[in-house]
Image: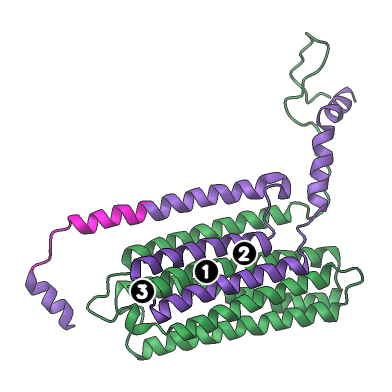
Chain colours: A green, B purple
Amino acid sequence: MSAQTFEATANGETPLFYEVEEHHHPEGSSTMLGFWMYLMSDCLIFAILFACYAVLGHSYGGGEGPKQLFELPLVALNTAMLLFSSLTYGFAMLTMERPGASVRAVQGWLIVTGLFGLAFLCIELYEFSNLIHEGAGPWRSAFLSSFFTLVGTHGLHVTVGLIWLVTLVTQIGMHGLGQANRRRLMCLSMFWHFLDVIWIGVFTIVYLMGVLG
Amino acid sequence: MSADTLHNSAHGHDHGHDDHAHGEAPHGSLRGYMIGFILSVILTAIPFALVMTGTLDTTTTAVIVLAMAAIQVVVHMVFFLHMTTTAEGGWSFLALLFTVIVIVITLAGSIWVMYHMNANMMPAPAAVTETMSQQ
């Protein structure tokens, strides 16, 4: 115990000011907490983009505002897609946690989730291209710049989530539902549900409050 | 050796607790996911319906829409992200709390400061506003 430099002999015990030996942690035991920390920092990115939108959202530059540009039925459909995908990802996790879970069943739910996610992205890109064709691209006004940045960043996250999802479907197909793959699926689950939470903010603040005026 | 035994006696309880927290990954149940989903559908449908039909006046609608969004965020956190105050020994909840505080400061600060900046700006000369709107 040469590492210990402080010796307190008053009560005959040796106080420990720092840990001499490393704890044994099972592999991946801190992954979930670490991933949660990442999600929280991602949350701050969105908070800043929301703040930008809140500040610039009324600077139309003499152009059209949310009332003329946004189509709420399309946004409602988009919201439904993301909500369904959250539910089906939940089903994938439930299937995985069942004892003797079959890889095929988990893959099936993941693919359904991916299709909902893809539908969400397609609808969003359709909306973006419509706006740009109407001459309401991100260069038109500060409102549209902040709109495209905020909603586009969310869309980019969904895209990355989809790539991750396809990767994991392949991964569990090749290596089964081992401890490492379960952990990866749990991380993606958090990521996917987190994106749905951000979308609540987007459809409320950007679309509903925007159309409301 | 003596340090080891002391260490174990002092932190033994904490360790047991930690191991428990690590071993118990957040689990959802079918019931939980369904409750979360149905609540989310309700909390999404009402704001959309209110804004699209315009039955209530603007201020009331805005308050309801914002309140429902806040509730839905909590619903998602609890039923989909399985957030509890005890998961990971409370650290994830602490991180969430910290993030919420930073977000509130960022949002409220930006809106407050920029609103006052806008209000205190000198009005642009009429000629400039006209050319801007013509573009």
> Which quarter of the image is occupied by the N terminus of chain B?
top right
Q: CA distance from mark 1 to mark 2?
A: 10 Å
| SS state under label 2 | helix
**Amino acid identity at mark 3:** Leu
State the extent of the magenta-drawn residues as a range: B109-125
Q: Residue furthest top?
A: A10
Picture residue at 55% right of the left edge, 70% below the top:
B43
Q: Quadrant of residue A182?
A: bottom right
Using the image as rendered, state which of residue A201 and residue B66 is in the foreground: B66
Q: Let me know if residue A208 is in the magenta part.
A: no
Q: Which residue is mark 1?
A: A200
Other-residue count near label 1 (Cα within 10 Å), few / some / many at <14 / 14–19 / ≥20:
many
Mark 1 residue element: helix
| Front residue (pair B100, B3) | B100
Q: Is residue B106 above or below residue A79?
A: above
Q: Amino acid at mark 2?
A: His
Say which residue label 3 marks: A212
- Residue A144, quarter of picture: bottom left
